[in-house]
Image (spheres, helix red, strand yellow):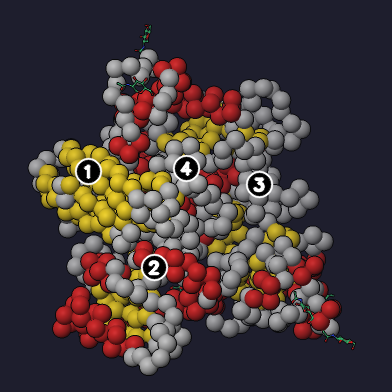
Amino acid sequence: MEAIHTHRNNHKANSMARKIPNVFWLLILVFSCIILIGNTKASDGDAREAYIVYMGDLPKGDFSSPSLHTSMLQQVLGSNAPESLLYSYKKSFNGFVAMLTEEEKLRIAGMDGVVSVFSNERKQLHTTRSWDFIGFSQQVQRATIESDIVIGVFDTGIWPESDSFKDEGFGPPPSKWKGICQTASNFTCNNKIIGARFYRTDGLFKEDDLRSPRDTNGHGTHCASTAAGGLVAMASLYGFGKGTARGGVPGARIAVYKICWSDGCHDADILAAFDDAIADGVDIVSFSVGGTSINTFEPHNMYPMIYAGNAPNTTGNFTGLSSRFCSRNSLDANLVRGKIVLCDSLTNGRPPLVAGAAGVVMQDTSFQDYAFSFPLPATHVGVNDGSSISEYVNLTSNPTATIFKSYEANETLAPFVASFSSRGPNRITKDVLKPDLTAPGVDILAAWSLVSPVTRVKEDRRRVPYNIISGTSMSCPHASAVAAYIKSFNPSWSPAAIKSAMMTTAFPLSVATSPEAEFAYGAGHINPLKAVNPGLVYDSESIDYIKFLCGQGYSTKSLQLVSGDNSTCSGVINGTVWDLNLPSFALSTMSLKSFSQTFKRTITNVGLPSSTYKATVTAPQALKINVEPSVLTFTSLGQKLSFVVKVEGTIGRTVVSASLVWDDGTHRVRSPIVVYASS
Ligand SMILES: *[C@@H]1O[C@H](CO)[C@@H](O)[C@H](O)[C@H]1NC(C)=O
Ligand SMILES: *[C@@H]1O[C@H](CO)[C@@H](O)[C@H](O)[C@H]1NC(C)=O
Ligand SMILES: *[C@@H]1O[C@H](CO)[C@@H](O)[C@H](O)[C@H]1NC(C)=O
Ligand SMILES: *[C@@H]1O[C@H](CO)[C@@H](O)[C@H](O)[C@H]1NC(C)=O
Ligand SMILES: *[C@@H]1O[C@H](CO)[C@@H](O)[C@H](O)[C@H]1NC(C)=O
Ligand SMILES: *[C@@H]1O[C@H](CO)[C@@H](O)[C@H](O)[C@H]1NC(C)=O
Ligand SMILES: *[C@@H]1O[C@H](CO)[C@@H](O)[C@H](O)[C@H]1NC(C)=O
C-alpha cells in the first residue's frame, strides 16, 4: 500500500485511524475488489493507475460527493475528469477512486480536505513470499557475480544441514575469500556456507552452549536463510505459509560468525567477529543484534493461547456456550488479558480487544479477507486449520502461539511498521533521520535449527526445519540481501551509495497505519528492483564523516577511535550535521518557533550519461522549502552536482513530513524531509 499524505491533514489522519479503524480498512477492502478489474501496474511514467483518495468523514448537511469529486478531478485533469472517476464513496465516509498518473496523484494529494491517497496495489504478507511481497520475484535478473558476494551473518550460528544451505551448483569460494571453517562439533562448511567461526572471548560458555558455529537457537539460521538461502519448494510451518522459501540473494555465499550464546551477545565477541569478517573478505555484514541489549530476541513473539469457550465473563452471566463465539462482553478479562484468544466465529475483534487480549484467532468458513479489519493482531482461519489449532490449545498444558495473522487470509493492510519495531528520532544526533528505511519483518518463514523448539520454549518438544518468527531482526536480512543484490550489479559502489539507492527508491508508507511517520519507516519500504538502478546517489566517504564528527565536537582521540586511522580534527573543515551528504533531511526544532535551515547536498549520476533532473517538493503549508538549483543537468556518468535545500517555517505539532524528488522522467530519487519538535 503506497500512500501519499497531505501533511496539512496529518493530524487528522492520525486521529481518524484511531477513531474509526473499521471504516478505514473497509475502504481498502472495497478497493481490493476494484483492483482485480482494470489495474495497470504501478509505473514511473505517465501510465495511470487507480488510487483511492480518502477524505475522512462525510461533510454534514446537503452534499453531493460525486460532484465534489468530479470538480476536484477537473482541476487536475480538465475535461478527462469524468472518465477518470471510477467510484465515489458516499455512505460512510468521503472519498473516491480515480485513475491518475503519479503526478496527478501528487496534485490531488495536495488539495484541501484530502487526508491521503493510496495506491491500490494488492500486496500480500504471506511469509514465504516476503520477497514477492516487495516486488522481488524468483525471476528477477541476477548478476553473474552474485556468487562472488559473501554475506557475513553475525548471529547464533547456523544449521548447516538445512535444505536452504545446499551447495548444488556452487563452485569453489571466490578467490578473494580468506576465511576459515571452524569444524568443531560435527560442523562442516560447503560451497554455500564458505566460512564459519564462533566467538566466546571470555571463555564463559554456558551449559547449553555448543562450542561450534552450529545454531542451537534458530535465530541465526532464520536470518541467514532469509538473506541468502537457496530455493526450497514446499517449505512451511505445519502448513502455514506454504510455498517456496528463498533468500533475497540465493546465489550469494554465507559466512557465519557466531557471536550470540544462551546468555546473549557480547561486545567483545562482536568486535572480534567484525575484525575477522573484514579480513576474511565479507562484502555485507548482516547483524541484527539490538543496541546495549543482552537479549537478541524480540520478546513479543509468543503469547499464551486460550480458547474463548474456557473464558466466559461470569460477572455478566455468560457461559462457555456464548463466550466461545467471542460475542460482546462475553469474555473474562482476567483470563484473556495478554493472551491470544481462539474464537469459534468471526467477530469484529472488539470483545477480545476490550478484554485485553494480545491477539485473536477466529475459525470460520466465511470470506477470508476480513482478517485485516481487526483492531488487534488477528487471523481468520478455515475450519480445518481451526480444528488443529483447537486441538493444540486443548491438548497442550501451556499453549502458546505467534499471531498467525497473515497466513491464511490475504493481508491487504500491509505494509505497516509493526508495534515492536524500534522508532526514531535519533537520540544522539537529532538531525540525522533514523530509521533509514523499513523492510518485511512480520511473520517471516525461514530455515530453523533442528535442535531448537519451534517456540524456543524449552518444554516444547516440537522441532521444525522451517519456522515463522517476527522482529526487527527479520527485517535486517531482507535489507542485507537487497544491499548484496545492489552490489552484485554495482560492485564498485560505496556503502553510502548502496544505502542511498535503498533509501531513495523506497516507497513511502502511510502515516495512518504508522503514526510516527518517518520515525517509524524512515525513507519508506524497501524496493529492491528500483534500488538496483536509482539514477542518482548521495555518496559519501570517510572524509565526509570525519568533517561531520569534528563539527560535532569530537576530539582527535575520539575521532581516531571511530576512524581507526591517523585522522585529526585540526586542518579539516568542520562539517555541520545538515551538510552531511545523506539521502534524507531532518531538522529538530521547537514547537511554534520559526526556523530557517539550509542543507547542502551533492548528488552523483549513476543513471543515464546525459540526463536532466527536476526537483519536486511536496510539503505542507507549514513549511516553505526551496531547492536551488531546481534543475540539474548531467552530461556524464559519475558526474557530481550540488544543490542547497532551504527549509523555513513554524511547526505546531510533533512531526511534519515533506519530501524532495529528483525526477528525470525515468528515475525518481526521493528523500524524506522531516521537521520535528524535539523536547
Ligand atoms: C554429524 O552430522 C551428520 C549430519 O547431521 C550426522 O549424519 C552424523 O551422525 C553426525 N555425527 C556425529 C558424530 O554427531
Ligand atoms: C446475573 O444473574 C444473577 C442471578 O440470576 C442476577 O442477579 C444478576 O443481575 C445477573 N447479572 C447480569 C449482569 O445480568
Ligand atoms: C463482563 O460483564 C459485565 C456485566 O455485563 C460487564 O460490565 C463487563 O464489561 C464485562 N467484561 C468484559 C471484559 O466484557
Ligand atoms: C476440548 O476437549 C474437550 C473434551 O474432549 C471437548 O469437549 C472440547 O470441545 C474441546 N475443545 C476444543 C476447542 O477442541
Ligand atoms: C489470496 O490472493 C491470491 C491472489 O490474489 C488468491 O489466489 C488466493 O486464493 C487468495 N487467498 C485467500 C485465502 O483468499
Ligand atoms: C572545529 O571545531 C573544533 C571544536 O569542535 C575546533 O576546536 C576547531 O578549531 C574547529 N576547526 C576549524 C577548522 O574550524
Ligand atoms: C599513522 O602514524 C604512524 C606513526 O606516525 C605511521 O607509522 C602510520 O603509517 C600512520 N598510519 C596511517 C594510516 O597514516
Q: Residues within 10 Å of mark 1 (few under 14, many from 20)?
A: some
Residue 546 seen in the current view: yes
Compute the Cα span from label 3 to label 1: 55 Å
Q: Position of residue 362 (x, y in %)?
A: 65, 75
Give the SS element for disc 2: helix
Labels 1 and 4: the sequence-earlier one: 4
Pointers 3 and 1 in contact (CB under 8 A)?
no
Q: Position of residue 211 (x, y in %)?
A: 67, 29
Q: Kindly indicate the quadrant of the structure image that contains residue 510.
A: bottom left
Which label lies toward us, 2 or 4?
2
Which residue is under mark 1? 644
Labels 2 and 1: the sequence-earlier one: 2
> Toward the viewer: 321 or 11?
11
Q: Residues within 10 Å of mark 2 (few under 14, many from 20)?
A: some
Q: Amino acid at mark 2?
A: Asn
Q: Amino acid at mark 4?
A: Asn
Q: Amino acid at mark 3?
A: Leu
Give the SS element for disc 1: strand
Labels 2 and 4: the sequence-earlier one: 2
Image-based side of 322 in relation to 647, left or right: right
Say which residue appears at 22% left-offset and 43% top-offset: 644
In the rendering, which numbered label is found on residue 450?
A: 3
Which label lies toward us, 2 or 3?
2
Q: Regarding ligand 3, which quadrant of the image does it lie in?
A: bottom right
Compute the Cα span from label 3 to label 4: 38 Å
Which residue is under mark 4? 426
Is residue 77 positioned above or below 417 on the image?
Answer: below
